[in-house]
Amino acid sequence: MARTVYCVKLKRELPGLDAPPFPGELGLRIYEHVSAEAYRMWGQHATILINHYGLHPVDPETRKFLRKEMEEFFFNDDTEMPEGWIDPSDPRAPARKGGGPRKK
């Protein structure tokens, strides 16, 4: 049976992570208070941040930034999307790179 946690992000009891996502105090805090579903949501949010700001995940400054953003994402109710970010499904979003449909 999966362990459950009261998820601070989604505000309800949900299946938790199988293990802390990484060593240290923040990893343990996430393990104890964040659901597996919310942790998957973080992965999507982190991808948005990386792409929006053109970050390089191996860069120590990027890792520091993402760690701070992760803590905000899980433990602060006022988490926001990056300034200027537009959801790609929004009709106002610019066309994606790669041009139009393939010519026959």
Image: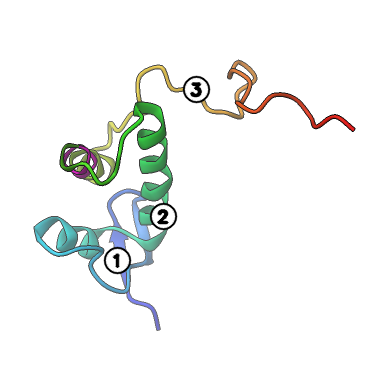
Provide the secondary structure element on which disc 2 rests.
helix
Q: Is residue 63 magenta?
A: yes
Provide the secondary structure element on which disc 3 rests.
loop
Classified by dominant secondary structure, the portion drawn in magenta counts as helix
Question: Which badge, 1 or 3, comes first in the chain's sequence?
Answer: 1
Identify whether 38 is placed above or below 104.
Answer: below
Residue 5 marker: 1
x and y percentages locating residue 1 in the rendered image: 40, 84
Q: Label 2 belongs to which residue?
A: 40
Residue under the image location 29 percent in, 44 percent down: 57
- Residue at the extreme left: 25
x and y percentages locating residue 60 in the rendered image: 16, 43
Residue 86 marker: 3
Residue under the image location 61 percent in, 29 percent down: 89
Nearest to the observer: residue 97 or residue 29: 97
The region drawn magenta spans: 62-67
Question: Which badge, 2 or 1, comes first in the chain's sequence?
Answer: 1
Crowding around mark 1 (Cα neighbors within 10 Å: few <14, some 14 to 19, many 20+) is some
Nearest to the observer: residue 77 or residue 55: 55
x and y percentages locating residue 71 in the rendered image: 20, 44
Compared across the picture, whether 56 is left or right of 94 comes to: left
Residue 7, by quadrant, is bottom left
Crowding around mark 2 (Cα neighbors within 10 Å: few <14, some 14 to 19, many 20+) is few
Residue under the image location 33 percent in, 76 percent down: 3
Q: Is residue 97 magenta?
A: no
